[in-house]
Structures are given as C-alpha cells and as structure tokens.
Image (cartoon, coloured by chain):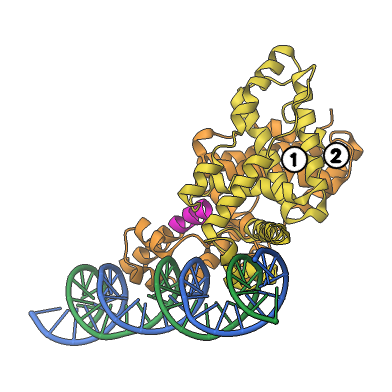
Chain colours: A orange, B yellow, C green, D blue
Amino acid sequence: MKRQEQKEYRKQEILYAALDLFVKKGYAATKITDIAEKVSMSVGLLFHYFESKEKLYEELVKMGLQGTAYPGNQRCEHAIDFFEQFAEQLFLFMKEQLYVAKMFVLMADAQRSEGTPETVKEIAMKVNTIEQFVPIVEWGQKEGTIKEGDALALSNAFWCSIQGIAEQYAAHPEMGLPKAEWVVDIVRVK
Amino acid sequence: MKRQEQKEYRKQEILYAALDLFVKKGYAATKITDIAEKVSMSVGLLFHYFESKEKLYEELVKMGLQGTAYPGNQRCEHAIDFFEQFAEQLFLFMKEQLYVAKMFVLMADAQRSEGTPETVKEIAMKVNTIEQFVPIVEWGQKEGTIKEGDALALSNAFWCSIQGIAEQYAAHPEMGLPKAEWVVDIVRVK
DNA sequence: ATTTTCATTGAATATTTATTCAATATTTTT
DNA sequence: AAAAATATTGAATAAATATTCAATGAAAAT
C-alpha cells in the first residue's frame, strides 16, 4: 500500500508548488511546465495526477475552502477582543506556515479576478468574508469598544487591510508581519 | 491636424481599456482580443497603435510612473498629519477618478508579480513605496504623534492596508472607500 | 479630381502553451 | 521469476493566443 501514499504525497507536492506559483505569478501566467519543473517531474506525469490546469486550480481552491476554518472562535468578552484574537491567530498561522498566507491570497484572487474559471470561482465564493464581521462590529459599537461609523465599511477596511498585508507577506515573507494590534486599531475606538 | 489628435485619443482609449482589464483579470489572462473588443476595434488596428501586448503594458506602467506624483506634499505640523493628508488625498483622487485606483493596483502588481516582463518590471520598480514613509514615522515617534515600534514595519502595515483597500475599490467601487482616518489609526499613537 | 497618406479590417500565420500518447522503467502481485 | 499494474518520460498533437499582412475605405494634400 505504499503506492497510494506515494501518490498522495506527490499530489500534495504539486499542489503546493502550484499554490506558490499561482500566488507569485497568477494563475494565467503560470505555465504547466513551470509547475512540473518546480517539482522536478515531466509534464506528462503531472497530467497523470491532474487532468488539467483548471482542475488543479480547483483542487487548490477546495483545499483553501476547507483549511480556512478561520480562527477566533474563542469566547470573547468584548467585540474588540474578537478582532484582536482573529488577527493575532491569523498572523500566527501565517508565520508558522507560509502556505496559509499563500492560500489566503489565492482565495481572494480566485474570488476577485475576472480571469478565474467559472467553476473555480463558484467554489471560491463559498468562503464568506466581510459580511461575517458586520454583526461583531455592531455589537462592539453598542458596547463602546469599536469606533462609530458604517459597520460594513469598517469591516471592509479591516478585512482589506488584512488582505493587503497577507499579499505582501506571501510575496515577501522576509519582511515579516506587523503587530496584530496595529491593524485592529482600524476598528478600535479611540 | 485632426489625424494626430484622433490617433492620440484612440491610443488613450486602448490604454484605459487595457488598464481596466489588466486590473480585473491580470496581464496574462487578458487577451488582445479582449482589449480590442472593449474598444470596438479590430485586433489589426490595435497592433497599428501598439506593437505588442507587452509594449502596451509598458506604456501603461510609464503612465503610472508619471501620474503618480503622490499627494501629500503640503507642509504638515505633525508627522501624523502627513499620513492623514496622504490617505485623504489619495482616497479623494480615487473617488474622483477610478483610474487612479486602477493604476495604483496595476503598479503594485507590476512590481510584485513574477509574471511581469522584465522590461516592464524595471520601470515599475522606479516608484518608491514603503521606504518613503520611514523617516516620517520616525519623526512622528520622536514627536509622539505616531505609535512606537519598528518604523519600517509600521510603514509597511500602513502601506499594505492602503494597497488592500485600493485593490478592493478598483474591483468593486460600488462598495466605496473607508474613512481615511480609520486607516491612519494604524500608525497613530493611542 | 487625383494622388497620397493613414485608418481599418479580418483572415492567415506564427508562437506559445496545454494536453495526449506510445514507449519504457519501476514497483507490486502472483 | 513472470505477469500485472503503475509511474515516468518527452516528443507529438491540439488548442489558444499573439502578431502579420494584403486588401479596402476614408480622409488629407496636391
């Protein structure tokens, strides 16, 4: 039963190589040969594992969908603590495993780009994003731990910032990540 | 002399169409026919105006390099005012002219992506980014208007946030932009 | 009004890139 | 150890996309 394991391992290898390249160059700009070269295998073999470039992309996005059991499910006394914990945990994950940051970027890209194949986009769209923060912002505003203003706009600002930071980090991890509390200050009451 | 004007106008049309598509789909995913279709002209004619897709990209990035005479040259009493004004002006520009936001994203992409043709990347790299904020952060820290911490990391956090917001706005302008002061809170002392 | 220049088209060609496949090597099963 | 199954290769083919070009129409110059 070694074969099965080996196969699974190889598939993973390909997936991670593709993830890296898709994030660094974009899906369209990444050639099958780039991926094959990166994992030192022939293109033919790559197609033995994945039936097409698009299916490969699809599998990655499916991975992202699962893996993204977002952090911050802990009980929080205040709404602001949720953001604090969320950002801190996410940054921690990213530091521990770079692929988390890459996956983060991949998913956002898949969602946003008009170049994403329809079938892939559909899957990527299942991750809920900004909206999930809105009720928490509203709670924090009642409570007085989060600043006043349109709750969706605040959520959006927070989310986009995280997004921008993740992008930078995925491309240049050597630059490091900022302190989570700095980013949380976007929503924190003054 | 009508011809010359007309030609210039048409060239601009192409450039803006390409800008929009490059931002929405990425350079590699954008087909020449996409651009041609968008400006309702034959591919042949498009090549009459630009000798290649890459040259078209190059011209766009050159435009971006010039046009990006960044805001915030005003005299500021405090370092924090610089960030305040910078963000406010930039957001204002983006709201007034969407192409500013698009250009912003295009330039960042050209800089960051490994898919960018070398010749284009070289040009894009000329816009100085994060580093320009570092001395201002340091000034603000002495002054007490900007929070403590690694100045480069703070600059980076600020810049990435702006970046993330611009990306979102370029893709979905209907969502609007957050208040500039929210973003500035990333660097503002508490 | 004629000539010349430039704009315009879209089908033809060239190039790049994804995908297939027949052949060979390796591993597993019998 | 032979047979069967699977992994692996890279050159051949197919598909997608960029680029050219010869022909035509429209505007400008003579």
Q: Quadrant of residue A78?
A: top right
Q: Check disc 1 and report its element: helix, strand or loop.
A: helix
Q: Check disc 2 and report its element: helix, strand or loop.
A: helix
Alpha carbons under labels 1 and 2: distance apart: 10 Å
Q: How many marks?
A: 2
Question: Residue A141: in sight, yes or no?
Answer: yes
Identify the mark nearer the N-term, 1 or 2. Answer: 1
Region in magenta: A16-27
Instruction: Name the spot of residue A47 as percent of width and height, x first.
Output: 39, 72
Decide: is B79 above or below A167.
above
Q: Nearer the viewer, residue B54 or A50?
A: B54
Instruction: Name the spot of residue D23 as percent of width and height, x first.
Output: 54, 84
Subunit bearing disc 2: A
The reply to whether discs 1 and 2 touch (Cβ–Cβ < 8 Å) is: yes
Q: Nearer the viewer, residue B6 or B169?
A: B6
Examine the structure image and report whether residue A20 is included in the region drawn in magenta.
yes
- Image-based side of A166 in relation to B146, left or right: left
Residue at left offset 68%, top offset 58%:
B4
Question: Residue A72: in sight, yes or no?
Answer: no
Q: Quadrant of residue A177?
A: top right
Per the image, the residue denoted by label 1 is A82
Subunit bearing disc 1: A
Per the image, the residue denoted by label 2 is A140
Residue at left offset 78%, top offset 18%:
B78
Decide: is A151 above or below B174.
above
